[in-house]
Image (cartoon, coloured by chain):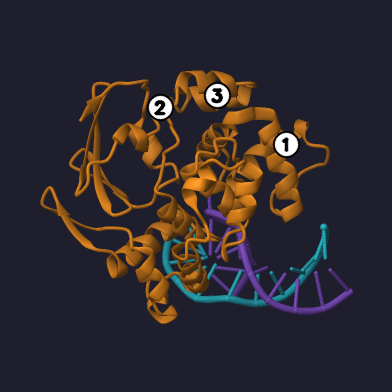
Chain colours: A orange, B purple, C cyan
Amino acid sequence: MLTNNLLPLNLDLTIDSGQVFLWHKINGHWYGIHGSNVVKVSMNNNFLEFSSYPENINGESIFRLDDDLNTIARKISKDSAMRDAVSTQNGLRLMRQEPYQCLLSFICATNTSIAMIRRMLTALSARFGRRVEYDGLKFHTFPELKRLAEASINDLCKCSVGFRARFIKQAAKTIKSGSVDFENLKHTKYEEAKEELMDVLGIGQKVSDCILLFSLEKLEAFPIDIWVARAVSSYYSHLLDEKLDETKMTPKTYRLLSEKMREYFGSYAGYAQQYLYCYARNKIVKRS
DNA sequence: TCCCAGGACATAG
DNA sequence: CTATGTCATGGG
């Protein structure tokens, strides 16, 4: 499938921006795990080339080409910091993930690094997913909820998930039971949907925001991790009433901050957040 | 050896 | 409602 609708799209930047964790670049093509499918993507002079297996998936949907990025970039470019973040990362987009995979991924993302998240999710898929071969390459699909819900804590721990094992198992049980309806949440107001997700064990404010932004169409969600907190502290302290200690993110501080930033950036605050996140990781001095 | 990483939970006040 | 300690794991 080929498309050039509403580009720009920078594949490398987007896929490697801490949203998805089961993608690999092989021979110039990106291969990713999208639920029970393997997807294959590449760019050929402004055309998105896309295929998937075993099901036929819409690549424009995964890369949110239905979002008019130029308009969004213009809307969030309200200050010099964001203008710089946008202009130096042209084509960075949000992705549209499978909600259940996104949810489990960000439960694994608590208090760890991206390299570790990749390791955990790769191990979980290898142990509990289904083997698929595509383009002569071997993959494992993302585990079905049933497998994770029935897995023993011990076997989950073999995937280096540590204390997250019980969260993964319990969350898989909860979602499988149907008490959380993703399709319904897509049409529920941000605040209400956020609260509902936080009823799931292992999901707090930040993880909930990530799930909402990356898989449930809540583009106003503004997840705050340590990097975004540093960026806000560096570039947006003038918007805050009190001085921000970005090392101490209490639930109260998180609530105030994210509310402030949603208010400032508006309905596309999530895009602003993603630009800030990547910008901060490259720009702000990493403490050794 | 200590600190950090896309934090959240349990408990006590 | 708020503050503090605890939770595995691996890299730097």
How many residues crowd around disc 1 within 10 Å: few (fewer than 14), some, or many (20 or more)?
some
Q: Where in the figure is residue A184, as x and y percent of width and height? A: 51, 47
Q: Is residue A206 left or right of residue A43?
A: right
Q: Marks 2/1: CA distance?
A: 27 Å
Q: Where in the figure is residue A203, as x and y percent of width and height? A: 58, 59
Q: In this view, does A96 lie to the left or right of A143?
A: right
**Pointer 2 residue:** A66
Say which element carries label 3: helix
Please give the chain letter of the residue carrying mark 3: A
Q: In this view, does B11 lie to the left or right of A262?
A: right
Q: What residue type is labelled 3?
A: Asp
* Circle nearer the N terminus (2, 1): 2
* Circle nearer the N terminus (3, 2): 2
Give the foreground label among 3 and 1: 1
Q: Residue at x 10, y 51 (%)?
A: A136
Q: Which amino acid does label 1 sit on?
A: Lys
- Checking the image for residue A46, the label placed there is none
Give the foreground label among 2 and 1: 2
* Circle nearer the N terminus (3, 1): 3
Residue A288 visible in the current orientation: no
Give the foreground label among 3 and 2: 2
Q: Which residue is drawn at 39% across and 69% down?
A: A148
Please give the chain letter of the residue carrying mark 1: A
Quadrant housing residue A190: top right
**Pointer 3 residue:** A84
